[in-house]
Amino acid sequence: MDATPQPLNMDALRAQFPLLQAQAEQGRVYLDNAATAQKPQAMLDAQRHFYQQQNSNVHRAAHQLAAEATQAFEQARQQVAAFLNAARAEEIIWTRGATEAINLVANSYAASQLQAGDEILISVLEHHANIVPWQLLAARQGLVLKAIPLDQTSGELDLQQGLAMIGPRTKLLALSQMSNVLGYQPQLAPLIAAARQQGAAVLLDGTQAVVHGPVDVQALDCDFYVCSAHKLYGPTGLGVLYGRYALLEQMPPWQGGGEMIESVSLSAGSRFQPPPLRFEAGTPAIAEVISFAASLSYWQSLPRTALWQHEQRLFQRLLAGCRALADVRLPACYQLQQPNSILAMSFRDAHPQDIGTLLDMQGYAVRVGHHCAMPLLQALNCNGLLRVSLAFYNTEAEVDGFLQALERALTEF
């Protein structure tokens, strides 16, 4: 990142998000961005324009409206490929979300390539979406699912233990690029290199990381990468699966239906399209794909390095303020410099749910609970955390206001 941050016009940036304006008028502050980000006017306009001016199904049809919709749909695929630095647009598959993307890899690649006794290595940091599909697959096929533990002193992943867990039976490494609970980003490169030495495939869950720093799937040396549109200021119900094309070509379809076939015969069976259409059965989320492209264009038009620097300053301000409150308990990983934009906490005398309710009464939207990461909370020896998650459109005034509201809430206990 540049040493000197670029000046930001926060009022102009925030004006692009209608819900932020409406919330501000009601005296409310949105600090739940890890769950979903707010939507810029550009995305809302693109979705409205599609339904009002372009609405048609994509591919195959001969009429002009379908051609226009198909062109916009496939241009979005090319745009996402460039954004992630995929080698070709055909390596981008549209899914209903990052969760479905992981399930696709589990039920197509892993189900067809892994044999009984083979090992899948995840970590205790993972979202349930990167745990449960592997548990289901392991139970069906006799696979062994292992998880890299936390170092109880530092609160980060135990890298040495993780490296020791990679061996000849390791066939898939599936890790989060950034924890959705802690904002912590594990050291992936040594683990990926060790997995490669064993010939294992690599899947990275970039759902949180993709919006907080540059992503290059080729430099990461991953075979699969998943992310969600709605965390990149886009629509809900849409995800992206990047897959290395040589692997996608080998993978069987996961779902059957229209569009993913070349031909269907009741006597001779079916032949399937090459990737990516092989994995996109049925009518896709056309409006969502096209409006996501508008979100991405908006995001890429901004001074992202300056925005990431702004997020880091907000995070450090939030972290310092929480450390100053005697009743706040922070996981050990916040002694590191790596956590980014997400701060999770518990309290000496209060339950996170109670504090979350009191904060909401003061106009601050945060999230409480297990955050779809029960194994991580078990490793942290807690049954719930309150999570504050920042985005580039949050401000110092909002962070300061939250800290004051949190202090007031804690006085109730």
Image: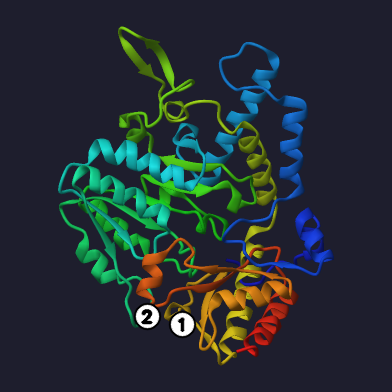
Q: Callout 2 environment at 10 Å: few (<14), some (14 to 19), or many (20+)?
A: some
Residue at screen point 30% across, 9% down: 268
Question: Which is nearer the eye, 344 or 347?
Answer: 347
Residue 9 seen in the figure? no
* Cβ–Cβ under 8 Å for marks 1 and 2: yes
Residue 264, quarter of the rendered image: top left
Q: Is residue 196 visible?
A: yes
Q: Using the rendered view, name the quadrant where residue 252 is placed.
A: top left
Residue sitting nearer the eye, 329 or 247: 329
Where is the C terminus found, in terms of image quarters? bottom right
Q: Earlier in the sequence, mark 1 or mark 2?
A: 2
Rendered view: 194 above or below 71: below
Residue type at mark 2 is Ser
The type of residue carrying mark 1 is Gln
Protein image colouring: rainbow
x, y percent for residue 197: 22, 53
Q: Which residue is mark 2?
A: 154
Indicate the secondary structure of the residue bearing disc 2.
loop
Q: Is 305 on the left or on the right of 253, as rendered?
A: right
Residue 349, horizontal then vertical, whole percent: 52, 88
Give residue 379's quadrant in the image.
bottom left
Left/right of residue 386 with respect to residue 358 in the rendered view: left
Query: What residue is rendered at 70% in x and 18% in y?
Result: 65
Residue found at the far right of this picture: 25
Residue drawn at 34 percent across, 83 percent down: 153
Q: Secondary structure at mark 1?
A: helix
Q: Residue furthest top?
A: 267
Quickly name the residue at label 1: 335
Could you tell me residue 233's position as x and y percent? 65, 51
User: Where does residue 368 sit, x and y in percent of width and height?
Assistant: 55, 69
Give the CA distance from mark 1 to mark 2: 8 Å
Quarter containing the N terminus:
bottom right
